[in-house]
Image: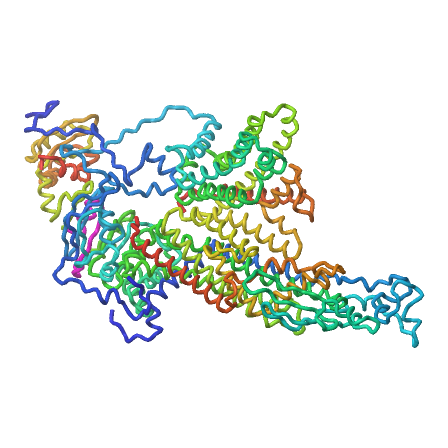
């Protein structure tokens, strides 16, 4: 047996190389969908310790062989990447495979959405049974448009602030907690886009609750009561004003919420913080105005500033008499500016590590 | 169980008398399933004394097994006994158990000494006793000089040793270490291994998990291999090794001139077959890894070729597990 | 380990103290704890600032009966003319024409000239006679006996005061003779009323509600859940300690931070209101009782809420989702208890019971509170005599923030005891459920 091209040795046992690949998914380097789940997961997906059922008995020896396949695609434009982030967050409300908002959050959104449609239902009902009295209570008018967006109880106690609190809870803070923000920033995405898209997606989800129901309310009136153009021309400015009021509400809650989310690590703090700011400042202002007949503290309460501005632009009877609504507007601008400043400075200085 | 209101001592541990004859750990047909995923399937195991290594890949069920032993999770079926006592919902046996969890997270704001003495008090020690005890265990793992530094400033190896020290409080009879060597540098690794060996020598029952065979090899000879939730092998490492030696192994040698080298290597008795995969590589099969390794240097010198690398891709846990699960070839 | 003979202190130094101490130290290292505590402090300070400002303010003294004016322009205020029996509406008739002539009084003398002289409180259903005509314009010689006794109880120049009917949600009934206590000192009343309303508002809404619910929300929700999700719970649970104990001692550690904090804040509030409040002496000691009850109620509220939120945290990773609507519910209940304290739905809240403690203490410390409110509403003639008629400033807030203990007529002390025991039972039940739940929890 001299050196030939192939040297024969007694009975070689062939070993298959790299043909069958068995993937071990628990704690192993994650890839494909596994990685996406870990990255976007609100639950602690990357710590799930799943095990697999043993493979069939006749698996042969397996040797791991890695083949690197270079990526030859081209990078999509910026807006497309941003759209992906946005879609990932918003679509997560509706179906699996996107950002997994927790089940209770989604459940609560559904409940609040239906509850916000109460006046739509009553408008339709009043048209159906032709009750003018019911319609005067629930139909579209100046006060009801205001109440749909900015009414204190129950909408601004039980619905909108809690929705905002549940949404902002983990949007940024969980990324920081799990270190998944690193997955964003290892891609060609700048931090401004990252925050911007998170902001817009949270605002969009709230808009479905606040503004979509407002539009449905208005259209249900047009359809059920057979309103003509004259009525629409009359009431459209009111509708628009209520729409602007609702937009302000969403922007303010989102700014404050995300500002809180960016300074904390847990998902508890931002949610409770937002609730505490909205309801706590309101309670405090009630105490002072009741006791000392001083309304000045309402300027510190986001809800009351929104309500005051809303009353001014929709034109309902103002309930704040000691100062002009422009002060409330100025206060709102200040609140938003402060929150956005905190948000941007925190995100731009955010260390891309698991904290 | 009512809490220890009067704080007069240790009601649970006082009432609890370990069964003398019972093995330290007894698992009888223990299974754990999460939905359709079987994390553990029918494990039956009994351990007493000495160091035992639990080997298995990620997801093999090592951590699940430890969590069941520590009463953190409840087995879906089967019986678990620690010193003859069921640990689920019963913390009494932990008076004699030390546990090193796998999680990296620690109380970074505490000093090592504070951390250990605070938790030592949960064993029923008073404040003063706990401080003395903390000094003792920190000395044992060689951290006494940094005992009053914050854990947050520790290196990975020091953190692991702190966790081990925490587990050694009150001199437990059973010490369970979940991946104690993970992510440690060689120095820390050696220190920790020495600590574990020392514990075994002192007659404690020590259970160490790892997915790296060499690590376990250096600590103990008694191993348990878990694979996909099943108990695959149990016993002396050499016995297992010997059986493995009967199975063909592959050795890759990188050299300028593989054919020239092959000429001298083929003369080694234990060589089974030689392949030339591609380029400057030589792939050798052998049935007896031990004798091949002792003959290889001579053969290389004889051929006069320059060898760039010798690689033993089979000699890791995955391939051993592969052989062990490899059906009739065992 | 070798055990030395245990003294009480050495024994206490074991598990309970270890976990409690550890929890307190853990709180101290978290920034969020400090943020929450400082914001709470700022909220109370803000209320106190407004309070001090309210006490510095001069309340307007209103001439309820208008007799400080000189209707006829002869230089004598109407009250003085009425007292001397001259015609207040004729410039040709005034006390200056009497022998000897009387100097005209400055008009200020006839503002607040006839203050409340209600020195006793009638029992329920009882009728008593109170009041004294300080300025003498009722008991004048030129008036007939029937003019002096317009409320027909055969006592000239008095006020009939009837206590509220037993069992009914009734107020005092006031029926006064004309010109008795008709122009009380509004400024003094307003100051006193606003002071009392502030003590109740700061105590009930400021401490028991705002501090009492938000501090536990922030601090207690993650007490066990955070440890479970970060994996550090393993260090504690691998020791021979029952999980129910861990639950309890973690709560003790939380209380070790929260209770002293409450005590300091309540002490500051008591100091500020004691010094700045209207008082003859340097300091109002009498209200320490109310502040003690506020502290007590807030301590119990933080205990129950702490247990509850910690329990929510153990129950579920998203415990906060249960806690947030609960907090909104408690806000509703707090506002309800201000308006309708006897509503039975309050029995299903925590805050309702806690506020009962403060209300009962207010009844004990200010036995005259109901009568005092009634005085304000009556306001020197608002009893339907048609003479003057509006309530005094400060009455409305005091009415809003004070309420009778929700348990009806069983007496303040007993209702305080009942409310305390209900809250303690709630805490114990929550601990038990939370402990059992925690015990059966699988920790990954």
Is residue B132 shown left or right of residue C200? Answer: left
Q: Is residue A244 visible?
A: no
Is residue B79 shown left or right of residue C28? Answer: left
User: Which residues lie in the magenta part?
Assistant: B200-220
Q: How is the image coloured?
A: rainbow
B139 lies above or below A25:
below
Instruction: Assess whether residue B106 is covered by the magenta stretch.
Output: no
Residue at 51% x, 53% y is C333
Residue A229 location, quadrant: top right
B220 lies above or below A309:
below
Q: How many marks?
A: 0
Is residue C126 shown left or right of residue A83? Answer: right
Instruction: Assess whether residue B212 is covered by the magenta stretch.
Output: yes
In the image shown, does C399 or B190 lie closer to the viewer? C399
Residue at 23% x, 59% y is B97
Residue A293 point in image, percent of width and height: 67, 55
In the image shown, does C351 or B265 lie closer to the viewer? C351
Residue A288 point in image, percent of width and height: 62, 55
Residue C403 point in image, percent of width and height: 57, 60
Q: Which quadrant, please, contains the N terminus of chain A? A: top left
Residue C43 point in image, percent of width and height: 57, 56
Residue A152 location, quadrant: top right
Residue at 65% x, 24% y is A230
Q: Is residue A302 visible?
A: yes
């Amino acid at each position: 047996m001299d050196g030939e091209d192939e040297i024969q040795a007694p009975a070689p046992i062939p070993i298959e190389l790299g043909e069958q690949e068995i993937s071990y998914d628990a704690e192993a380097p994650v890839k494909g969908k596994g990685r996406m789940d870990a990255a976007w997961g609100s639950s602690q997906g990357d710590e799930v310790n799943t095990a697999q059922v043993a493979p069939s008995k006749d698996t042969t020896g397996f040797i791991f062989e890695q083949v690197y396949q270079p990526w030859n695609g081209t990078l999509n434009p910026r807006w497309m990447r941003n759209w992906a982030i946005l879609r990932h967050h918003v679509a997560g409300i509706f179906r699996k495979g996107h950002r997994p908002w927790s089940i209770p959050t989604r459940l609560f959104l559904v409940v609040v959405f239906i509850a916000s449609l109460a006046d739509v239902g009553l408008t339709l009902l009043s048209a159906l049974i032709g009750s003018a009295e019911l319609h005067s209570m629930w139909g579209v008018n100046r006060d009801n448009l205001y109440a749909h967006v900015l009414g204190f109880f129950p909408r601004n106690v039980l619905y909108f602030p809690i929705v905002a609190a549940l949404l902002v809870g983990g949007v940024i803070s969980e990324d920081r907690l799990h270190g998944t923000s690193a997955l964003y920033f290892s891609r060609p995405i700048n931090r401004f886009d990252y925050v911007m898209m998170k902001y817009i997606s949270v605002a969009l989800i709230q808009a479905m609750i606040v503004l979509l129901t407002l539009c449905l309310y208005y259209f249900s009136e047009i359809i059920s009561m057979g309103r003509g153009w004259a009525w629409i021309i009359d009431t459209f400015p009111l509708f628009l004003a209520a729409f602007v009021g609702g937009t302000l509400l969403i922007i303010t809650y989102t700014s404050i919420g995300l500002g809180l989310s960016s300074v904390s690590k847990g998902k508890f703090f931002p949610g409770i913080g937002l609730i505490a700011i909205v309801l706590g400042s309101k309670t405090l202002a009630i105490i002072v105005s009741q006791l000392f007949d001083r309304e000045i503290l309402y300027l510190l309460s986001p809800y009351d500033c929104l309500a005051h501005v809303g009353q001014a632009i929709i034109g309902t009877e103002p309930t704040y008499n000691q100062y002009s609504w422009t002060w409330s507007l100025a206060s709102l601008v200040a609140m938003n500016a402060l929150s956005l400043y905190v948000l941007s400075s925190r995100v731009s200085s955010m260390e891309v590590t698991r904290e | 169980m009512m809490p220890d209101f009067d704080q007069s001592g240790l009601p649970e541990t006082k009432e609890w008398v370990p069964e003398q004859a019972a093995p330290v750990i007894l698992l009888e047909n223990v299974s754990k399933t999460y939905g359709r995923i079987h994390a553990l399937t029918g494990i039956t195991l009994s351990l007493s004394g000495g160091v035992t290594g639990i080997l298995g890949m990620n997801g093999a069920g090592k951590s699940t097994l430890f969590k069941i032993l520590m009463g953190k999770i409840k087995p879906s079926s089967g019986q678990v006994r620690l010193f003859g006592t069921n640990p689920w919902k019963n913390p009494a046996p932990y008076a004699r158990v030390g546990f090193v969890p796998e999680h990296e997270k620690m109380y970074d704001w505490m000093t090592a000494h504070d951390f250990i003495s605070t938790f030592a008090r949960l064993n029923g020690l008073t404040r003063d006793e706990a401080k003395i005890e903390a000094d003792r265990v920190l000395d044992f793992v060689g951290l006494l000089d940094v005992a009053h530094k914050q854990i947050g400033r520790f290196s990975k190896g020091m953190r692991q040793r702190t966790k081990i020290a925490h587990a050694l409080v009150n001199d437990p009879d059973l010490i369970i270490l979940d991946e104690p060597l993970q992510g440690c540098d060689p120095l820390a690794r050696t220190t920790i291994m020495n600590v574990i060996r020392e514990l075994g020598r002192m007659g404690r029952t020590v259970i160490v998990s790892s997915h790296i065979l060499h690590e376990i090899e250096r600590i103990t000879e008694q191993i348990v291999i878990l694979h996909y939730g099943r108990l695959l092998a149990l016993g002396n490492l050499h016995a297992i090794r010997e059986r493995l030696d009967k199975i063909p192994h592959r050795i890759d040698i990188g050299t300028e001139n593989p054919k020239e080298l092959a000429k001298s290597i083929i003369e080694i008795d234990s060589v089974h077959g030689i392949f030339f995969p591609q380029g400057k590589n030589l792939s050798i099969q052998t049935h007896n890894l031990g004798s091949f390794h002792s003959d290889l240097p001579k053969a290389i010198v004889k051929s006069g070729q320059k060898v760039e690398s010798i690689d033993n891709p089979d000699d890791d846990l995955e391939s051993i597990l592969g052989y062990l699960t490899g059906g009739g070839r065992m | 380990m070798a055990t030395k003979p245990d003294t009480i202190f050495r024994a206490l130094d074991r598990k309970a103290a270890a976990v409690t101490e550890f929890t307190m130290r853990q709180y101290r290292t978290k920034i969020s704890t400090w943020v929450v505590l400082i914001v709470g402090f700022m909220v109370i300070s803000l209320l106190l600032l407004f309070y001090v400002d309210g006490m510095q303010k001069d309340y307007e003294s209103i001439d309820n009966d208008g007799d400080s004016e000189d209707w006829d322009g002869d230089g004598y205020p109407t009250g003085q003319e009425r007292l001397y029996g001259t015609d207040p509406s004729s410039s040709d008739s005034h006390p200056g024409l009497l022998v000897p002539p009387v100097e005209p009084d400055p008009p200020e003398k006839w503002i607040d000239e006839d203050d409340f002289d209600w020195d006793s409180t009638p029992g329920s259903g009882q009728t008593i006679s109170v009041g004294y005509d300080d300025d003498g314009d009722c008991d004048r010689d030129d008036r007939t006996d029937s003019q002096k006794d317009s409320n027909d109880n055969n006592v000239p120049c008095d006020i009939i005061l009837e206590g509220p009917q037993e069992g009914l949600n009734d107020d005092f009934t006031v029926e006064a003779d004309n010109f008795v206590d008709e122009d009380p000192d509004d400024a003094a009343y307003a100051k006193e009323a606003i002071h009392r309303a502030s003590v109740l508002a700061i105590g009930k809404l400021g401490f028991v509600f705002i501090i009492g619910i938000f501090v536990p929300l922030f601090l207690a929700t993650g007490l066990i859940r955070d440890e479970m999700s970060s994996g550090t719970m393993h260090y504690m649970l691998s020791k021979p300690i029952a999980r129910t104990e861990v639950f309890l001692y973690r709560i003790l550690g939380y209380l070790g931070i929260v209770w002293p904090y409450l005590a300091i804040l309540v002490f500051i509030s008591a100091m500020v209101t004691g010094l700045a409040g209207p008082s003859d002496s340097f300091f109002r000691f009498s209200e320490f009782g109310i502040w003690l009850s506020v502290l007590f109620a807030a301590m119990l509220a933080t205990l129950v809420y702490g247990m509850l939120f910690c329990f929510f945290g153990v129950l579920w990773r998203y415990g906060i989702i249960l806690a947030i609507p609960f907090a909104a519910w408690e806000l509703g209940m707090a506002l309800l208890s201000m308006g309708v304290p006897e509503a039975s739905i309050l029995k299903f809240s925590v805050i309702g019971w806690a506020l009962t403690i403060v209300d009962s203490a207010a009844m004990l410390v200010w036995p005259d509170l109901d009568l005092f409110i009634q005085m304000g509403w009556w306001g020197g003639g608002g009893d339907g005599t048609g003479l003057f008629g509006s309530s005094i400033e400060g009455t409305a807030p005091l009415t809003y923030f004070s309420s009778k203990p929700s348990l009806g007529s069983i007496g303040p002390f007993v209702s305080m005891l009942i409310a305390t025991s209900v809250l303690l039972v709630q805490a114990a039940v929550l601990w038990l459920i939370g402990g059992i739940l925690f015990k059966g929890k699988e920790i990954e």
